[in-house]
Image (cartoon, rainbow, N blue to C red):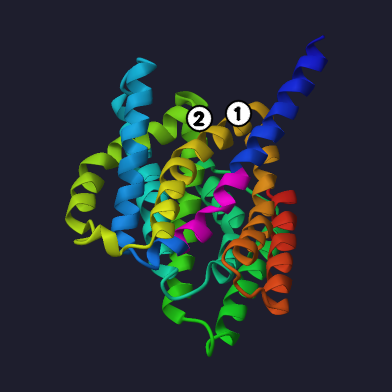
Amino acid sequence: MVRNMDRLKSSNGWINGLIGVLIFSGSLPATRVAVLDLNPIFVTAARASIAGLLALMVLLISKEKLPPRTQFIPLSIVSFGVVIGFPLLSAMALRYVTSAHSMIFVGILPISTAIFGIVRGGERPRPIFWVFAILGSLLVVGYAFFQGITSSPQGDLLMLIAVILCGLGYAEGGKLSKTLGGWQVISWALVFALPMVLPLTYFYIPATVMNVNQGAWWGLMYVSLFSMFIGFIFWYKGLAQGGIATIGQLQLLQPFFGLILAAGLLHEEISAGMLFVTIAVILCVGGAKKFAH
């Protein structure tokens, strides 16, 4: 009976985790559509404001108590990484590169998360872990370098920093969720950001909203409701049910899903080199994950 319950819990974890990854896979394509007509700072602030107000409402309805002060700094780190840092820098990058190109950098997100997890958790991975980690990073940097003519150094640098900050936010949030709870972590992180993002939303709102393409508003709504809040509910719930290390492997599917969406919805060109590098990076991430402990 207990074993069957554990299997059901694990299965539910895979399902919730997969839903979370599918939702996150649409983030960069949706952001790409939004920033074609909207300022990246407005997109970042507006998505955080909308999600933050929704999170505040959920916290009030659930009558959640304010986290202890010892968790304020970790929550601020989560907020800085996944609420502000990654959304802003990736939105800025997508003014220079396509969402398909940016997916290559998403391929090293699990490595970034793992490294910060090691730093924060004091773990000591096997030496071969670093071989895979460095190889994956070199593949991304090398591809970006050789694409210098058609790609943008500014966009590549912004995406690299964005992935680093996102890894920091994921690792800190994963650690914090063990004591605070999964959906509570992202909810409080969003609420913590409200005093900064609400004024920025007002300040950077377009002067004439009629000139903004309808697709940009749809893109903004997607990243606000799904990427910034709903996706995290499924993702953290999946991690809690199936285990962070196990369900975290699903992140490896995100670049594939993202490339499919970029090609299908935005009609962006997916080159053979781009696909090869993405697959190679995912294999490196898989190897690094295997030897992380």
Q: Is residue 286 left or right of residue 85?
A: right
Q: Which residue matches tag 1? A: 240
SS assignment at label 2: helix
**Could you say which quadrant of the image residue 11 lies in?**
top right
SS assignment at label 1: helix
The kind of residue on which mark 1 rests is: Ala
Q: Residue reaching furthest top?
A: 1
List x then y, in percent, for residue 209: 26, 58
The structure residue drawn at horizontal position 21% and vertical position 52%, both measured from the top left corner, is 200
The structure residue drawn at horizontal position 22% and vertical position 46%, both measured from the top left corner, is 196
Q: Which residue matches tag 2? A: 182
Residue in front for this viewpoint, 99 or 84? 99
Q: Quadrant of the N terminus?
A: top right
The structure residue drawn at horizontal position 66% and vertical position 73%, both measured from the top left corner, is 270
- Find the magenta span and give its range: 21-32
Task: Look at the numbered discs 2 and 1 and tell me whether their residues touch, using CB distance below 8 Å.
Answer: yes
Label 2 to label 1, Cα distance in Å?
Answer: 7 Å
